[in-house]
Image: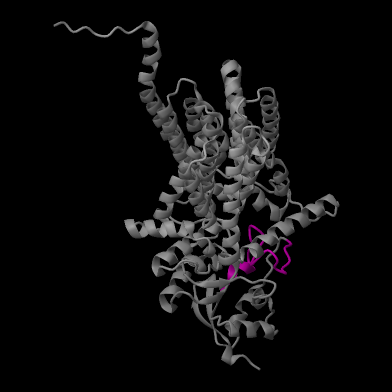
Amino acid sequence: MTLTAPRVSPAEISEKSPKSWQPAACAASLTAAGAAGAAALVTADRAAEWGRGGAFGWFWLGMLVFTLPAVWWACRRATGPMLRVAVLVAYACFTYLPKLLRNPTGPLYHDEFAHWRQSREILLDGRLFDPNPIVRVIGDFPGLHAMVAGISALTGASTWHAALLVLIAAHVLVVLGVAVLAEELWRDRRIAAVAAIAYTLNSSFLFFDTQFGYESLAIPLMIWTLVGLLRAMRGPRADWIVTTLILAAATVVTHHLTALGLVAIMIVFAAAMTGRRGAAPAAWTAWALAAATAGMVTAWLFWVAPKTAGYLDPYLGKALDQIAGMLNDSGSGGRTLFKQSVAPWWEQKAAFAAPMLALAAMIAAAWRLRARRSADPLTRGLALAAFLIGACYFPAAVLILTPSGAEGARRSWAFSYLGIALVVAPLAVALLTRAARFAGPTLVALFAVMLVGNTAAGMNPSYRFPGPAAYGSDTRSLTPEVVAASNWLRATQGRGLRIVADRYSGLIFGSFGGQFPVTGSVTFPTYDLYLAQPGTPVPPGLITQLSSWNFQYLIVDRRMAREVPEIGIYFETNEPIPHDGRPAFTLGQLTKFDHLPWTIKIYDSGDIAIYRFDFSRVAS
């Protein structure tokens, strides 16, 4: 019997042969690009740390040398579905590298200390919902901390390394989640990949939503909740309805703002479907799931986390007051972007250009959506909803001009850019299909400008690059001296002590030291202890408060007499302390505690002194 090979047509050979080399070529090119990019990022960090020039150039060289070929592989027409997914995973992993290199061994950003402490306390004591002295509401949202503590307990990894496992996985799930969401909307894998890449251009992606914070886990939970919602809307099925509710519940117990944003997005989706011919079942499903999620959020905020409203309200109120001050030409409330920034001019120009480019892209996408209306009513409704969500980016950008609103604006971009990515992606693919020679280089240039500009607008250089220790910096105030003092207090006096401190030493004593610091407020002005002049009495009412609330120790950082805080805050934002470019304290104000009968010095390392309160010795 003679065996003959099956006949293969030339067309089949030309169709299959290119795909046979794609995975190997892609792996080789991205491996080389990733190695080169990582080396450039390390060079950027070392240049910044040692005070040499070129850190910004090396950083963006490292980012673009990998992201540009990755974008090419992800968005090209001939890339297969599995290879496309692999490229998106590689892209997500590489884009976590800048934050990983920034602080690979422990917390660095302000909120990271709070979340590290909360996770560590759960691991040590096994209790959820314990109060947190650094960020007072995070104890009511234990999703991230319970997961990190559980992984640490199961694997034996440190709290920080367990957190890194969660954060890297969450970062990957963000990219894949946007791709799946876009594919569910447009039924096109190439558009899905472009949408995922477009979403990564938002200002929070590289540094803010990669930090050890509850947003970093809540954002992927929200995105995958929306995936479940769309699949439930396309064909009401019990499995996707239940999945959506489970993911929504996980979002609710993880982060307050993300849960509220999820409800708002679900309502927009439901409203966009209402009244459309042939979309009634989808609309009813969307409304039911939105109502259920809103009920979960309301119940959690009312019964479990009632402090959340009081925590969030001052930020919005101050932002509105500051906007009103700018509109009234009173000269109050505004902030100047890049004031005294060390960012190079081209980063600053790109930061101003990025919103304009996003606006132009949204206008073009709106025109295309109107000119090429889909026959599917569900797709039309969801596209309109995505456009409305994306349009929220532009009014929110106004808040960046106010000190209090800037934080909220940065947090909102993780939501609004989802809409921008979903509606702009079909436009980009259409341009690549019709005029690849012109559209390809143009879109690459736009990608680079928006990546650079949005990152520059979203995070200050001190968050992005290492550097010498600086008093009053939220990222560079950690020094071995402060850590040693906090470790000494914990080792000799125990943890869980109530202490009075400034913002920066309180951050370290409250996290690594495991203490309960207070840094002052209008109703509990502990900063008056420091402000009192030598020889003048401390307000008796404050001493009564400290004694009745069982405060035991006082931390004094003598650098307050020599240096001005980098962010302009000694204790808290409403402190009654002048900020005129000079230190607000004299050395006498900070050393007077050596001579008071009711403050007993128990530790002195030069800059850091620790005193024990003995209120029985206060003169009546």
Task: Please name the residue shown 44% across and 40% down the image.
Answer: 93
The one of 572 and 348 positioned closer to us in this rendering:
572
Q: Which corner quadrant of the image does residue 436 belong to?
A: top right
Task: Please name the residue shown 48% across and 75% down the image.
Answer: 496
Q: Mark yes or no: residue 256 visible.
A: no
| Figure check: 256 above or below 545 | above
Can you say which quadrant of the picture contains the C terminus?
bottom right
Task: Please name the residue shown 68% across and 86% down the image.
Answer: 540
Residue 313 percent location from the top left of the image? 69, 61
Task: Please name the residue shown 59% across and 36% down the image.
Answer: 451
Residue 384 percent location from the top left of the image? 66, 35
Can you say which quadrant of the picture contains the N terminus?
top left
Q: Mark yes or no: residue 325 visible.
A: yes
The range drawn in magenta is: 556-580
Q: Is residue 568 left or right of residue 139?
A: right
Q: Which corner quadrant of the image does residue 539 belong to?
A: bottom right
| Figure check: 608 above or below 211 | below
